[in-house]
Image: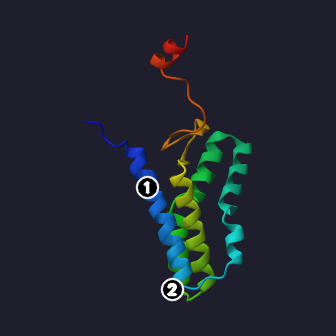
């Protein structure tokens, strides 16, 4: 019997987080224009110019649910809707990344993530021998 890969669960979880974030944002009547900033967390990849170790650290800080959760709680405690909206957009971004298979980075390479290696992989040996 084939089992479902763990990464499939993690990707589906990301899709759920994306959907719930959009639902909450809409339910709170958030304005549309802040969605222009949905890709802002990806600017953290610039930290890779300092090397893969620093790059992974900064990228992962911007792509875990920890910081947007803290931002959302701060927005609720201080009653600042803009912080709540920013947290939901940020969370939606992370969920979207997970759904697409983009995970947290390992310090070895930008392409090595907790969801697997990004990009093309080598064909399996069985496929390679059939095509030879």
Q: How is the image coloured?
A: rainbow
Front residue of 46 and 37: 37
Q: Is 19 placed above or below 129 here?
A: below
Read off the residue under disc 2: 77
Q: Is residue 6 left or right of residue 78?
A: left
In the rendered image, the residue lying farthest to the front is: 130
Query: What crowding class fits label 1: few (fewer than 14 Cα within 10 Å), some (14-19), or many (20 or more)?
Result: some
Say which of marks 1 and 2 sits in front: 1
Q: Give the total number of marks visible in the rendering.
A: 2
Q: Is 125 placed above or below 8 here?
A: above
The spot of residue 14 in percent (x, y) is: 48, 58
SS for dot 2 = helix
Q: Is residue 95 left or right of residue 50?
A: left
Q: CA distance from mark 1 to mark 2?
A: 30 Å
SS for dot 1 = helix
Indicate the quadrant containing the C terminus: top left, top right, bottom left or bottom right: top right
Residue found at x 65% / y 46%:
55
Q: Is residue 120 left or right of residue 76?
A: right
Q: Is residue 48 left or right of residue 117?
A: right
Read off the residue under disc 1: 12
Q: Is 120 placed above or below 37 here?
A: above
The spot of residue 67 in percent (x, y) is: 54, 66
Label 1 with label 2: CB-CB less than 8 Å: no
Query: What crowding class fits label 2: few (fewer than 14 Cα within 10 Å), some (14-19), or many (20 or more)?
Result: few
Indicate the quadrant containing the N terminus: top left, top right, bottom left or bottom right: top left
Q: Quadrant of residue 93?
A: bottom right
């Amino acid at each position: 019997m084939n089992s479902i890969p763990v990464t499939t669960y993690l990707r589906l979880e990301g899709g759920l987080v994306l959907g719930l974030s959009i639902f909450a944002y809409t339910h709170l009547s958030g304005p549309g224009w802040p969605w222009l900033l949905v890709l802002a967390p990806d600017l953290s990849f610039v930290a890779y110019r300092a090397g893969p170790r620093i790059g992974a650290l900064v990228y992962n800080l911007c792509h875990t649910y920890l910081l947007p959760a803290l931002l959302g709680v701060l927005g609720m405690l201080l009653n600042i809707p803009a912080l709540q909206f920013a947290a939901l957009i940020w969370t939606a971004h992370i969920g979207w990344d997970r759904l697409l298979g983009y995970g947290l980075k390992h310090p070895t390479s930008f392409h090595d993530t907790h969801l697997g290696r990004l990009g093309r992989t080598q064909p399996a040996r069985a496929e390679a021998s059939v095509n030879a």
